[in-house]
Image (cartoon, helix red, strand yellow):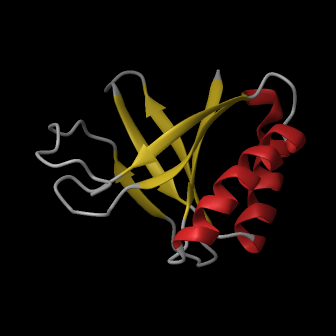
Amino acid sequence: EEKCYSLLVCSSDRIKREKFYWELKDKLLRNLPPGSDVTNMSSFLPDVKNSLIKGYFLKGKQENSSHIERFLVDLVQQDPVLVCSYSGDEEKQQWTQHVWSNKEVTLKYHVVSAETPTCHPST
């Protein structure tokens, strides 16, 4: 079984955000255990202008999850990145997103499909 994570670059400074996006990929490829899969991803709020956030989707083997999560905890504390982990319920065919934060409370959201936005989220 694989563990899944998303890492979104969060910075109000557009230039720093773009620079860190590429630095983050380098950090991931250097520090993750072999067999980890890193792909580009984007997140956005449907029909909200300029809501596009770039980042990466990470899949790692279950046996590497403690190594991966230690690395991600360090990353969250040092860099402008939002990390989420995902858990699935095979029986209900439903995924839950767990938003990582430095607070005691963990935010959880059900992952649902969304309609195609009427305007492109990067505009």
Task: Single out the residue that lies furthest toward the left.
Answer: 118
Q: Where is residue 117 drawn, in percent x and y?
A: 16, 44
Residue 62, compared with residue 96, is above or below; it is above
Give coordinates of residue 46: x percent, y percent.
20, 52
Q: Nearer the viewer, residue 89 or 68?
A: 68
Image height of 40 relative to 72, above or below: above
Given residues 63 and 21, the one toward you in this image is 21
Residue 53 in the figure: left or right of residue 29: left
68 with respect to 110 (left or right): right
> Which residue is painted at 37% across and 56% down in the image?
52
Q: Which image quarter is the N terminus in? A: top right
Q: Which of 42 and 110 lies nearest the eye of the viewer? A: 42
What percent of the width, then of the height, locates residue 37? 69, 27
Tell me the residue at 17%/37% (across/down). Answer: 116
Which quadrant of the figure has residue 118?
Answer: top left
The part of the image, by quadrant, that contains residue 101 is: bottom right
Q: Is residue 117 left or right of residue 17?
A: left
Q: Which residue is at a point 24% across and 36% down the rendered structure image?
A: 113
Quarter of the figure that contains the C terminus: bottom left
